[in-house]
Amino acid sequence: MIFPEIDTPAVLVDLDIAEANIDRFQGHCVDHGLAVRPHIKTHKLPILAQRQLQAGAIGITCQKVSEAEAMIAEGGIDDVLITFNIFGDTKLARLRDLSEKVQLSVVADNTEIVDGLSQFFADAPQPLGVLVECDTGASRCGVTTPKHARDLARYISAKPGLSFLGLMTYPPVGQEAAVQEWLTQAKTEIEKIGLTVSVVSNGGSPGMWQAQDVPIATEYRIGTYIYNDRSLQARGVCTWADCALSVLATVISVPAMDRAVIDAGSKVLTSDLLGLEGHGHVIGRPDILVEGLSEEHGVLKAHKINLKVGERIRIIPNHACVVTNMVDQVETIRGDRARGAVTVSARGKVQ
Amino acid sequence: MIFPEIDTPAVLVDLDIAEANIDRFQGHCVDHGLAVRPHIKTHKLPILAQRQLQAGAIGITCQKVSEAEAMIAEGGIDDVLITFNIFGDTKLARLRDLSEKVQLSVVADNTEIVDGLSQFFADAPQPLGVLVECDTGASRCGVTTPKHARDLARYISAKPGLSFLGLMTYPPVGQEAAVQEWLTQAKTEIEKIGLTVSVVSNGGSPGMWQAQDVPIATEYRIGTYIYNDRSLQARGVCTWADCALSVLATVISVPAMDRAVIDAGSKVLTSDLLGLEGHGHVIGRPDILVEGLSEEHGVLKAHKINLKVGERIRIIPNHACVVTNMVDQVETIRGDRARGAVTVSARGKVQ
């Protein structure tokens, strides 16, 4: 039985693989003169953020104020970018507190957000750095034209307590040339009005090996790369051997020759498909389809399932970042040796 | 602004609606002579389990040992059925401990599971009640024929420390006649070998109003009915007014006339689709499609989105049971009055 000391289902993190993933991408970015600012959403573990910083990262990225609070609580992290429009007095008061503990910057894509930031930072000892979030094609948040980026940069720079820092984008996948052009136009427009664009923040694991194809970027935000997952393997971004996160599960029923049921369902693996068929890759058994998930059951199908009740399997999930968020603790391993449970400090920090 | 004292995103539970849902289905089952054994997976809150018992439920259903442990910790719950094949020494030892605190029963669909149960209960002061899980068409766990059910019933009844209690099924939706026939055949086969089938446990919220169409059942297990959700509304099982759980979210960006972005993504609403288009129903705005979820962003689309940054909306999710499990606390409300946060005691209890 694999990992007999660990009860199932459990989320395993192979630290050897994670560390190699950190170092490989850090090296890639050093080669191309890009700073790395890892997104902690994938691991939510201070120990791995610290390891990313030791490897040369300039700081971390968080999505929510509460994530940042949880990540810095254990120390060793002193530079945080929150890539989210922060709104509302409760969050802004906490953001202000956070700014007194770390070097903090945020993003904004509209004037209402900027107004709120300014209100809470007008009397701060040093201005809050604000990046303009740019929609370069992904159609989520972001100003939609370079001229809008310029206008918002001007608005920020005129606001008490704020300092315009640069541009940030969550880019569309595989559109590096278009992203480069968009950001270059925005930078040019902004420089025309006398402002300095100190930071251009690009990111995304799917495009990680093409990071250098947006040369205007000064830094790259990246999350999933530390663990990798089935979606990145399917895109050719990594191999199975580069996947650091897996779900350890036990076969609890083999009702038919072609079907087995495991004790991990959507409350561990989640329902994220990311365009894939099935809910994960069973290590060593590419013939198995993780066909269906109930909340606590996973149904495996294969021409001959050839599994026994009590047998354990490991599944590389479609999407590592959401699996991390399902459990209070992950079990660290190195190869086939268990190295102890670690609390997922920023799990469930959605505010 | 709605619920200004609650930060977003938040999971709201309207206790008035939840209590009405409990009482309505309890009344339905009383009318049809069926016992109710609510599945706590949907709420994971001891206070609501206690309310279900006060309404007349005979006990609760859990899926995992750790869920049961969390649910009974606050007291007031003394009868638990775990509808899951329990395997492995760690879980079996905890199951044995649990049996000393509450009236406990479990299920099994194969001899390996039964052997493990017997090993840990052979010297127990009273035998553990075991139901044979039957696959009446849902193709998850369960013995696949009535004769297999009989054979496993005989196997259980001969094992030290165990007592054969009856049959349990997680049925296919809308197949009441077939389920009735399957269970009747199994009961007949089992009675032929001199065993008594004391309990026949059926369940499922989608078929709740047809519970009486499987008259062989003695009890009905039901989870989602307490909150309801978009999937049950789509099936005609409930109305929007019967939906007790909603996600409170804030609009953080309105980048285009037809698009807005909220601060709730898949780490609150989850990616469960259950066959539906979009990720939830925006209360009062049926024209809005919750088109896409990133981990912390939700993208709303409408012909005219007509929302402002800072505005709050409430979303009824596709699947209430998984949303409960994303947050440490839910915010209870009654109508438009906030009634305080409650810890989701059994959240993340997957083992």
Image: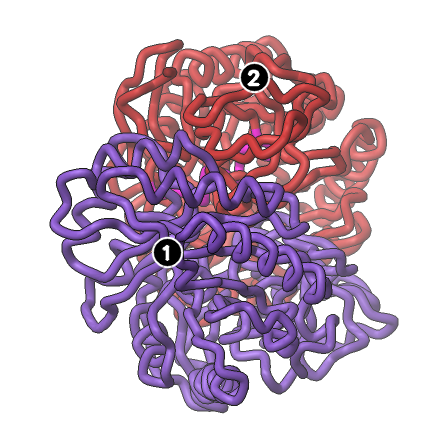
Chain colours: A purple, B red
Judge whether A312 appears above or below A273 on screen.
below
Residue B153 in view of the camera? no
**Mark 1 chain:** A
The residue located at (47%, 74%) in the rendering is A12
| Crowding near the residue tagged with mark 1, few <14, some 14–19, many ≥20 C-alpha atoms within 10 Å | many
Residues indicated by labels 1 and 2 sit on the same polypeptide chain: no
Q: Is residue A129 positioned above or below A216 on the image?
A: above
A349 up-or-down from A233: above or below:
above
Say which of marks 1 and 2 sits in front.
1
Is residue B129 within the magenta segment?
Answer: no
Disc on res. A71? none
Q: Disc 2 on helix, strand or loop?
A: loop
Residue shown at 64% from the left, 45% from the top: B195
- Quadrant of residue B46 within the rendered picture: top left
Which residue range is magenta in the image?
A: B317-328
Per the model, the C-alpha gap separating discs 1 and 2 is: 38 Å
Residue A165: mark: 1
Residue A321 percent location from the top left of the image: 52, 61
Q: Nearer the viewer, residue B58 or A9?
A: A9
Name the residue tied to disc 2: B283
Of A216 and B18, which appears nearest the observer? Answer: A216
Of A266 and B1, which appears nearest the observer?
B1
On the question of residue B255 being in view, the answer is: yes
> Which type of secondary structure does the marked residue at label 1 adopt?
strand
- Asked if residue B325 lies in the magenta stretch, the reply is yes
Residue for point 78% across, 60% down: A277
- Quadrant for the C terminus of chain A, please: top left
Tell me the residue at 21%/73% (across/down): A76
Residue A260 horizontal side relative to residue A78, left or right:
right
Q: Tell me the crowding category of disc 2: few under 14, some 14 to 19, or many 20 or more residues within 10 angstroms, Cα based.
A: some
- Amino acid type of the residue that numbered disc 1 sits on in the rendered structure: Leu
